[in-house]
Image (cartoon, helix red, strand yellow):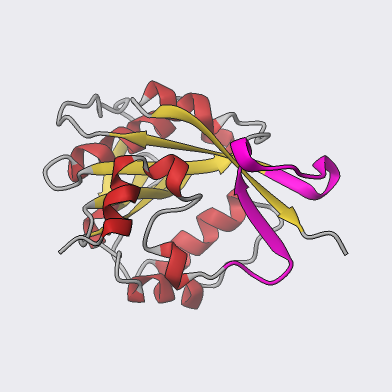
Amino acid sequence: MLTEEMKRYIADPCKALSTAYWKKDAFPIPAGIRIEHADNSEHDIANSTAYFRMVHYPHGEYETTLPSVYEYADVHMPDQAEMVADLLNRCYLDSSFTPQEIVNWMSYPVYKSDLWIFIVDAEKKAPVELGIADFDMIISEGSLEWIQVLPEYQRKGLGQAVVNELLRRMSNYARFVTVSGQIDNPNNPRELYRKCGFTGDDIWIVSKNSQ
């Protein structure tokens, strides 16, 4: 049974919380960090980061066609945890994900194996794009968590394709799907998500408390 808090979140998820609903209890806000909706925030720009949050209501019809040199492949966990970690680390030069960290994500209550997808370069037999989504079965919320394409494969439409494929897979059971990202990301992910049918202009500010 849905609680009143859940119902309020479902009614306007992007303004209610800065993250997917399940994370509010799973990942408490660290000491010294403040997270506020931009409408209610007075923040020091030098010590804050702005994040967008958007929502999509699945409709079941998505363009997922890939150029002939690429193909979708399910991520087989835990066997391919090293491949996932390697791709993420190549996308984020300052990251150091380990295979065990990736395996640990399988323990989350929102893990759903068919929402982990690679796009593979069929000629090189290697993954070049990763899409991971979560699904909260209690409130039927899908959330996009990782949409990463290797730098040398960007601007080929692969990001939009993998997002659409994840939305297609969730269209039969997700009430809605949310996503968030950093506003000043040079790759402009917010524009990508708008092309995939996400809407909303909610902004959340993450800042350090003044000492």
In which quadrant will I find the C terminus?
Answer: bottom right
When the figure is inspected, residue 142 is found, relative to residue 102, above or below; the finding is above
**Occupied quadrant, residue 64:** top left
Q: Residue at x 81, y 40 (%)?
A: 45
From the viewer's side, name the closer residue of 117 and 199: 199
The residue depicted at 40 percent of the width and 74 percent of the height is 103
**Residue closer to the observer: 103 or 4:** 4
Q: Residue at x 30, y 71 (%)?
A: 109
In the image, taking residue 152 as reference, residue 178 lies left or right, namely left
Nearer to me, 160 or 38? 38
User: Looking at the image, can residue 47 be seen?
Assistant: yes
Residue 168 figure quarter: top left
Percent x, y for residue 20? 40, 54
Q: On the picture, is 20 further left or further right than 33?
A: left
**Residue 147 place in picture, x, y as percent:** 45, 44
How many discs appear?
Answer: 0
Please say if 49 is above or below 96. Answer: above
The magenta span reads 29-49
Report if residue 150 is visible in the image.
Answer: no
82 is higher (above) or lower (below) than 155: below
Q: Which quadrant does the N terminus fall into?
A: bottom left
Residue 71 image point, x, y percent: 29, 38
Residue 33 drawn in magenta: yes
> Between 123 and 102, which is closer to the camera in this rendering?
102
Residue at 60% x, 52% y is 90
